[in-house]
Amino acid sequence: MENLGYAGGQVEPGEKGTQAADSRSVASPMNSSITLQTISDDTKTTTSTRDKWGRDIEFMLSCIAYSVGFGNIWKFPYTALKHGGGAFLLPYLIVLFIVGRPIYYLEMILGQFSSRGCVKLYDLAPAMRGIGVAQTIAMFVVMTYYAPVLAITFRYFVASFSSTLPWSECNPSWANCVNSSFVGRLEPTNGTAVGLQSSAELYFLKEVIHKAPSLEDGLGMPDWKLALCLLFAWIVVATILIRGAKSTGKASYFLAIFPYVIIIILLLQTLMLDGAMQGILYFITPQWDKLLSIEVWYEAVTQCFFSLSVCYGGIIAYSSFNNFSNNVHRDAVIISWLDTFTSIVAGCIVFGVIGNLAYVSGQPDIQKLARDGAGLTFMTYPDAIAKFQFLPQLFAALFFLMLFIVGVGSNLGVTTSIITAIRDQRPQLRHWQVVLGTVTVGYFFGLLYLTPGGFDFLDVIDYYGAKYVTLTFAVLELATVAWIYGVDRICRDIRFMLGIETSFYWRVCWGLIAPAATLLILIFSFADFELQKVPMGYNVLGLFIYAIAVLQLPGWYCYAVWRRRSKQTESLRKAAHNALKPMDIWGPESDTVRLQYQAEEEQYQNSQPLERSTVQRIKKRMFNKG
């Protein structure tokens, strides 16, 4: 049966267009080159070698490994449960169709067409380069705390091979503790059941992260065991990244495919558990009244946005290693649907296990057993596994191995985005030097999150430095690409690169729906803004990170205008206007192909009449196929 989501954006390449695209392809990974230049307008070209994926499928697999991460496994199930269960899937799929997938495809197009990372991409409008710099800041923030979560995951994986799961039984020093291996319902006796905590919860809080009551006394010292696990996680990432796209592409076969083998095994095991179906039904049963809530639609857009990892820079970086004629339209459709499928299956596994936990503990309210984020992964899930009667170690090892692998895949995309941004600006640096420098900095910053106050600190940094920075500059990225660079020009770039016409569906999503939806997310986020409940110094640090990111936009705009004014050929007003236009060296990586592109674009611009009204400009931007 034809998929309407796919048909809405389907574009058929004509024979002539395909031949044109193929003739422009720079498919050889060994002979590929990219035009790398400084941000000044007067610089022409300097040529340097840029890596390419060994095969086109390696790009798609790497994007799958990047997009499918922790958010699919621990955030989506809880968000869906909280906002209508199965009814949440309807707004989520609608948002995926009109926001998530279009942005994903757009970033793939931009990266592949220009062979630039998220900073140098703004050669298309140098005054807006601060967007790419701010997104790199957000990616650096994410990089610093993503690996520490990997470290904790790896420690749980190693602990899973113990003869008795260490979180299944209480430590004698823990007060008000009940063994997670206990099967049955605790009956309150003189209030003794009040305030009890499972051994799995206390193991995570007291043995693994040594959680402090608050940040009042500072962060504390990192746990040495987690520090070693963090070192191992970064060694894995560095080993894969050390040879660039070639080694990342080879690793993608394992990172993207093997987790699904484990997911299938876990799903089959989960379905055989007592009470699992009740948990799954609780997860997917629609609560239709929730569809009338604005909050549900807000959460659907937010979940789709962060689940696909759009507007962070990772997709652009990965796409920049593509061959010029790779079919990214196909890849965008496949990856967006696969990401959603993974979230749903992961939800079934998690809530199937929680259903079993409810069954064996006699707790009728599954909602009380569900936790958000790390609590679901490191407390609720281990508590349930500890009650398994048959090989709980196997179930635990498979789950945490899957979590570690998808985490590594996502961290590769995050780190690659930063490395690409650095090398685009400083091509004289060797790739291995940038890799080792980046992972070393990431390791030492990561130690901050492995302290007793680390998880509270993570919440603060993520809140200000990742969430708000990303949302703010997502709005600016879409506005810049769709309305300053122009939807019409994007469509001409697609036709030049792939030889295909772009449908109305993509145009209206890029130009209207996606920017509007992202702006609404940002407005709602600011409306809900409140300082974190931590000492004021940490809030000041978070606000400082956000301010540094925001100031990149006016700072780089002023710099671009100053560079143009330094030539003493333009007035201030003209320089400010021209700084929003593509630089002379904007275009494909190959010098020959770029000259051909610029000639065709100049011919097109000269053939167009001047638009005299705002309506005419909008019509040209959105619907003029040229």
Image: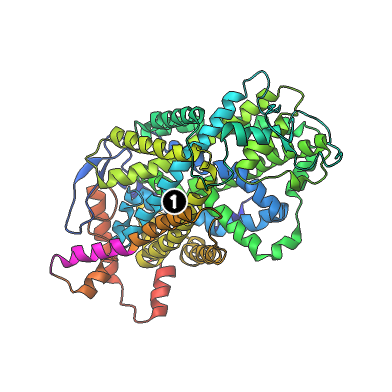
Q: Position of residue 263 (x, y in %)?
A: 63, 33
**Within the image, what quadrant is residue 383 found in?**
top right
**Which sits in the foreground, 617 or 626?**
617
Residue lying at the far top of the rendered structure? 163
Q: Residue at x 30, y 45 (%)?
A: 422
For label 1, count other residues whose C-alpha is less than 10 Å away and answer few (under 14), some (14-19) or many (20+): many
Q: Amino acid at mark 1?
A: Tyr
Up/down of 336 relative to 180, above or below: below
Residue lying at the far front of the rendered structure? 217
Up/down of 489 relative to 455, above or below: below
Q: Residue at x 58, y 32 (%)?
A: 208
Magenta stretch in the rendered image:
554-568
Q: Residue at x 56, y 33 (%)?
A: 153
**Which sits in the foreground, 486 or 350?**
350
Q: Residue at x 66, y 46 (%)?
A: 77
Up/down of 493 relative to 68, above or below: below
Color scheme of the displayed model? rainbow
Image quadrant occupied by the C terminus: bottom left
* Residue 127 visible in the snapshot: no
| Residue 169 located within the stretch drawn in magenta | no
**Within the image, what quadrant is residue 487 found in?**
bottom left
Which residue is tagged 1? 312
Please give left or right for residue 352 compared with residue 295 in the image.
right
| Residue 556 located within the stretch drawn in magenta | yes
* Residue 21 visible in the snapshot: yes
